[in-house]
Amino acid sequence: MKSKKMFLHYLKIAWRNLLKYKTQSIISILGLAIGFTAFAFTMSWIRYERGYDKHIPDADRIYRVFVKDSTQIGGVSQYSPNALASYLKDNYPEIEAATGVYPYKTDWNLKNKAFLSQCRFVKTDTSFFHVFYPEIKILYPGIIEKEYNILSLNTANKLGLGPQHTGQRIDSLNIHLLDIVPDKPTHSNVPFDVIYLQKFNPEYDMAWGYSSSYTYIRIKEGVNVTSLENKLADISVSRDYTGEKMYTLKYQCKLVPLEKLRTIHPDTEVSIQYHHLRLFAIVALLVIFCAFFNYLMLFTIVR
């Protein structure tokens, strides 16, 4: 009973102070409310941005290989030479697997009719799963002599396809279905509904003059990443283009961890970048501090 009376007494005093110092009280309450709301929202956004590709096994061993280019935004070129992935796999024993990837989103149309709207496609080669999902085993046909498609389970269900259709030509969809794989979270730098395996063209797929894919590598466990990046900082490739003279191509590569790719070099243009979010979180903390300090000043004012 006594504690209840004390609580009511303190509550009455607090209310009187709020009424006595209305301006400071309103500033403090609004500042704390706005500050905490902004900080909580920003931290939730930061957590979302940092959560890309957390579902991929050993994601810490997967890196995106950028080619340095001072003329581009960020000092790197988004696309790398088509031949880079196979070259890295063949010449650097530290690399367990490498692949070239071109993701895009479009409607899947057939005879001017959209089967799936805004379908996530990934144009790649047969090493895609070696890098990102080595636990998924697919019976690869070797060198791709024709076009194949691999569908996610959800996409296959939408199209009315099942395991009995794998390895067959689906004339109604104009595809050759190689396999159906489990669904993977779309909170990823490489989300997919359909994986499109093109017919192998050595003049294009193994060319250094064409840059139309993103290069990803999976390094072996225990590899010193700094040492590997130093090796990739100066790559020289000799090629004969004229039949008469050898030309040396030089590339400087930069490795970016897959888990930090979204925050450092996002593939899609974003209006609010990661460092903007960090600044906004700091500003929100300052607002909270100022509002709290203003509230404490109520107890130091000389009456």
Image (cartoon, helix red, strand yellow):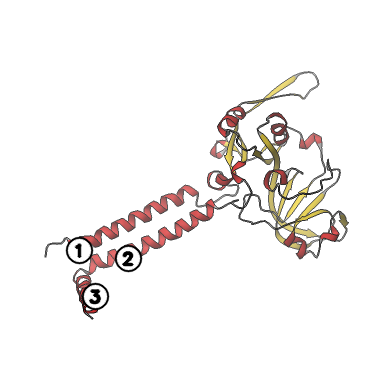
- Image quadrant for the N terminus? bottom left
User: Which residue sits at x=58%, y=31%?
Assistant: 229
Q: Amino acid at mark 2?
A: Leu
Farthest residue to the top: give it. 244
Disc 1, SS? helix
Q: CA distance from mark 1 to mark 2?
A: 16 Å
Left or right of 200 in this view: 254: left
**91 in relation to 74, above or below:** above
Farthest residue to the front: give it. 1
Q: Amino acid at mark 1?
A: Leu
Earlier sequence position, callout 3 versus callout 2: 3
Q: CA distance from mark 3 to mark 2?
A: 25 Å
Are the residues tagged 3 and 2 within 8 Å (C-beta)?
no
Circle nearer the viewer, 1 or 2: 1
Q: CA distance from mark 3 to mark 1?
A: 20 Å
Q: Which residue is mark 2?
A: 30
Q: Amino acid at mark 3?
A: Phe
Q: Which residue is mark 3?
A: 7
Q: Which residue is mark 1?
A: 298
